[in-house]
Structures are given as C-alpha cells and as structure tokens.
Image (tube, rainbow, N blue to C red):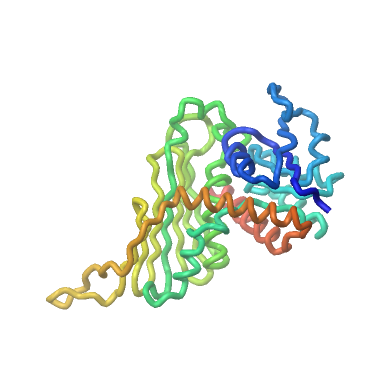
Amino acid sequence: MFTLVTKLGVIGYRNHAERLVNILKKRKDCTIQYFYHPTKKINNSKFTNDFSKLLSCDAIIIASPNSTHYAYIKKLVKNYTGYIFCEKPPVTSKSELRNLRNLNSKIKSKIFFNFNYRFSNFNKIFSKYLNSKKLGKIHYVNIISSHGLAFKKDYTTTWRADGKNNLNNILETVSIHFIDLVISNFGNISKSYNSSALVSKKGTSFDTSCLILNHENGVLTSILNSYAAPLIEELMIIGTNGYLTIRNNQLTIYSPRDTFDKKGFFSSPPVYQKKSFVMTKDYDDSLKKSMDFFILYVKNNKTFPLKNFESSLDTNEILLKLKEKR
C-alpha cells in the first residue's frame, strides 16, 4: 500500500519540468522527495546527483531533454518497481523504440507517456465534430502553433537549440502532440511529408516544421509549428457542410454549405456558433489533467492499460519516419 503522501522523484528542474512541478506543488497528497541531475550542483536539500536515491520514490517523473528519455527508462526498469511518468517523445531512435516494444507487459503497464493533449478540450473538438451535421464529412484539418522562443536571449544555451543531440526538437516536442491527436481522431496515415528549417539562425537545431499527413480515410492534415514566429494558435477543420476555426481565442462554426446570394451563387456560410476558446489555457489544463490521471493510478496502485503504451509508441514511430523525410 502507498502512504497517504505519494513520494515523487523528478529528473529535470527547469522549463517544462518546472511547469510539472508547479502542478504537483498544489497537491496535498504528493511530495517531491528528490530532484535529480547527473552533473549540476544546486544548494537544495532535495537536489541530488545520486541516481539511486530516486529508487525510494513511489513514482519518478522524467522531464529531461528528449534524447535522454530512453536512457533513463532503461536504467530504471532494471531495478525499479515503481511508476514512471515520461515526457514525450518516448524515444528518439528506431533501436530505442524497438527495445521499448520488447519490454514485458508488467513493466509497460507502469509507464505513462505524457501525451497530455489526449486530455484536452482541443481533442474533444475533433471527436465532437467528427461526424456532425453542421460540418459534414471532415476532409481537411490545418493546425498552426508557434511562438518566438528561438529569439529569446538564452535560447542558444538550451538543449532545444543543440542540433547535434536534438536536431528535430520542434517535431519531437511540439508537433508530436498534434500528430497524436489527428491519428487518434482520423486514423492511420498512408502518406506523410515533412519540411523542417532553421529560420531564426539561432542555434543548430530546426526551429520550424511543416507536416502534410494523408490519412487512410481520405482526411488531409497540415501542421505548422515554429519557435521563430509570433504567438499563433489556430485551427481550421473543413467539412462538406461547414467549417470550424479557432483564431484569436475564438471558436467559430460556419454552416451550412448551401448558402447563396441573390444571384444564386455560393456565399460564405453564416456563423452558427461562436464562443471563447483559449488554446494556451487549454494546454495548461490538459497538462494538469494528465498529471491527475497519472497520480490517481499511482495512489490506487493500478496498472495503466497497455493500449496507452502501445499507442504512444505508434505515434513515436510516425515521428521517426517523418524525421527521415525532411
């Protein structure tokens, strides 16, 4: 049985790791026992360079650079029986992916990969309007998510800008969320195209990617992500009878298709519905819901459905194929 207060270990301490820690600090049923970093020395009683100390925790959160995820999982599964929360992507190479697939089911069922958009309202929009009368049959989706991270003063000193170890970090950190979402809602991909670029000329890794995905059911998806642009969070879903947009924090549905002017020509459909929708807030909410889901399983000593593990690796496999096509 777990104690009332769940003891957690965190691998990583800045940026996204800090965001996760802030969520955990608001919970009264959890305590962070240790922060681990292999080399850095920080004057904090909870900060350690001794990896073995993490093994006393009920669960360990891996929120380190993408290229280190597999190495930590590999190290933990040898002699750790607790739960593992690992940021996406699970791995950055085909050999690592193959090794994860070959883990036994008992180990897999205690590993959770944080595809937090699965818990988002953004995801609910896809499922809600997938076969709706207002949109009709969906056949095109366009997603744009960007901000100016690459132009921040300290960007070039971070792991995200390191092309040697994290050349495709924009794909692995941002695009992977949306790839997972569209696969979950529109099914397998028959063809895919990827164009990546270093637009900002800051650092050596790609800061911009554009993906085109052809789903087997005929849906076409376009995904643009960038660290070298203003903050843009936009979605367009086009169906045979209407379309949906999220732009400037507003979700708007236009329908029906058969809207005509006085001459009998097609005209823009009227607004059927309009409401506030802040995608950046939805991301934060989904992150909390994802962590809540993980902690619930840990506290109840339950194992995660194996389909969650496998679907995470399926998304990861598509990502690896896209990296080859740049």
- The picture places residue 227, in percent across and down from the top left corner, at 46, 39
Q: Height in image: 43 above or below 68?
A: above
Foreground: 66 or 162? 66
Foreground: 14 or 58? 58
Which of the 4 quarters of the picture holds residue 129? Answer: bottom left
Which of the 4 quarters of the picture holds residue 167? Answer: top right
Q: Farthest residue in the left direction?
A: 263
Foreground: 44 or 66? 44
- The picture places residue 216, in percent across and down from the top left corner, at 53, 69
Q: Height in image: 326 above or below 181?
A: above
Which residue is depicted at the point 22% across and 73% down? 266
Q: Height in image: 77 above or below 261?
A: above
- The picture places residue 123, in percent across and down from the top left corner, at 51, 61
Left-right relation of 115 to 230: right
- The picture places residue 66, in percent across and down from the top left corner, at 64, 41
Left-right relation of 63 to 170: right
Which residue is depicted at the point 13% across and 76% down? 263
Which residue is depicted at the point 51% across and 50% down? 283
Left-right relation of 104 to 213: right
Q: How many marks?
A: 0
Which residue is depicted at the point 65% across and 40% down? 63
